Amino acid sequence: MDIPLADLKVQYTTIKREVDDAIQSVIDETAFVKGRYVKAFEESFAKKNGVNHCVGVANGTDAIYISLRALGIGKGDEVITTAFSWISTAETIQQTGASPVFVDIHPDTYNIDVSKIEERITLKTKAILPVHLYGQPADMAPIVDICERYDLKLIEDSAQAHFAEYNGQMVGNLGDAATFSFYPGKNLGAYGDGGAVVTNDDKLAETVRRIANHGALGKHDHEIGGVNSRLDGIQAAVLSVKLKYIDQWNDDRLKNAKIYNEALSGIGDIETPGIHPAVKHIFHVYTIRTSRRDPLCDFLSENGISTGIHYPVAMPFLPPFKELGYTSEKLPVASDYQNRILSLPMYPELTEDQIQHVCDLIKTFFRKR
């Protein structure tokens, strides 16, 4: 039985007619850039997130960069963020001229360890950029408190956490702005790149929209130098279709994660994902830990099971950030986990039989070794 890490095709077959009709409508109206399909999605996404504004942009990376820039982050500033995420989180900080300041992760949740944030604050610190990694919200209450006490901006990197919740409140409502990615493999994924910035701040939303559109709100209205980063009509139309199903898909992911947790309990040295008691985890990926990661990965691959590593190198140890001087001693948890994490197949349409097959193979691997 071959099982992919994610299966975008099987999801498409369940909504094929709606998606095809939506795409055809955009083509028929040649509404490729901006237009009513983008506007409709922005309004729906904002409403579902419980925020006042959504600005569609070209991708999740641009969403972070534009948010940082709109909040005035620039040369000489520092932005505190997690040591463990996709490179977009930190490279965008550098793109503004600021410097990322990395904090180690909590051993249970993979998210930024809030107990280690304050010690990293300096006079140059202007913002905190937590990541809701793997679909689990960061522990936001302490972060909000720190930002209020030190007068810092707060941007939520929600690229992997569409409609996850913290203390009953959806992510995206907890800071000055939140950023989302609609990369195809995300829980709410387009059929190409896409992203969004959400906020309750009217002025900030206007600034974000202006930066994303060459510094203009209307044609030739270039008050500042901006970038070209706009969500296109086809992607917006696809996302509007998928938005109707996202709650069920997220619930199915959580159900599948619970099946995994039970089936993998007590196998070898496997550690299953921890869930913070205050959150609704939407499991963008399902990531275990084991000291036998590489041979287990090879064994599963040989038996038709696709896996992933999110991420094989913690951000501070990547070449763009090495000059900042971080060592494994400074970031012991992130340093350790980069060698032990393994993501197993996770998508809403994954069946219990498929999950059990994966877990049976893992049992076989550890029994033989």
Image (cartoon, helix red, strand yellow):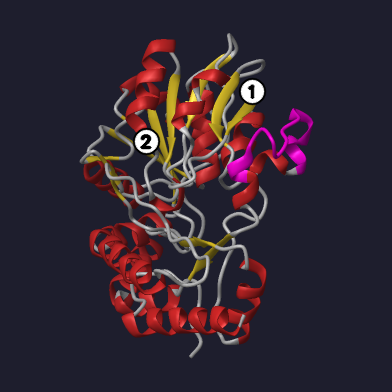
According to the picture, the residue beneath numbered tag 2 turns out to be 139
- The residue under the point 62% across, 28% down is 100
The crowding category of the residue bearing disc 1, from other C-alpha atoms within 10 Å (few below 14, some 14 to 19, many at least 20), is many
Can the viewer see residue 214?
no
Secondary structure under tag 1 reads loop
Instruction: State yes or no: residue 322 in magenta.
Output: yes
Judging depth in this view, the residue of 34 and 239 nearest the camera is 239
Please give left or right for residue 237 compared with residue 91 in the image: left
- The residue under the point 51% across, 87% down is 2
User: Disc 2 marks which amino acid?
Assistant: Asp
User: Disc 1 marks which amino acid?
Assistant: Ala
Point out the tag, 2 or 1, that comes first from the N-terminus. Answer: 1
Judging depth in this view, the residue of 122 and 224 nearest the camera is 122
* Foreground disc of the pair 2, 1: 2
Task: Identify the image quadrant of residue 203.
Answer: top left
Magenta residues (range): 319-334
Work out whether 70 lies above or below 10: above
Secondary structure under tag 2 reads loop
Residue 48 picture location, percent across and down: 23, 46
Task: Identify the image quadrant of residue 91.
Answer: top right
According to the picture, the residue beneath numbered tag 1 turns out to be 98
Please give left or right for residue 142 compared with residue 85 in the image: left
Residue at the far bottom in the pictured view? 1
Can the viewer see residue 202?
yes
> Quadrant where the C terminus lies?
bottom right
The crowding category of the residue bearing disc 2, from other C-alpha atoms within 10 Å (few below 14, some 14 to 19, many at least 20), is many
Work out whether 198 lies above or below 160: above
Residue 213 picture location, percent across and down: 50, 34
- Look at the numbered discs 2 and 1 and tell me whether their residues touch, using CB distance below 8 Å: no
- The residue under the point 32% across, 44% down is 42
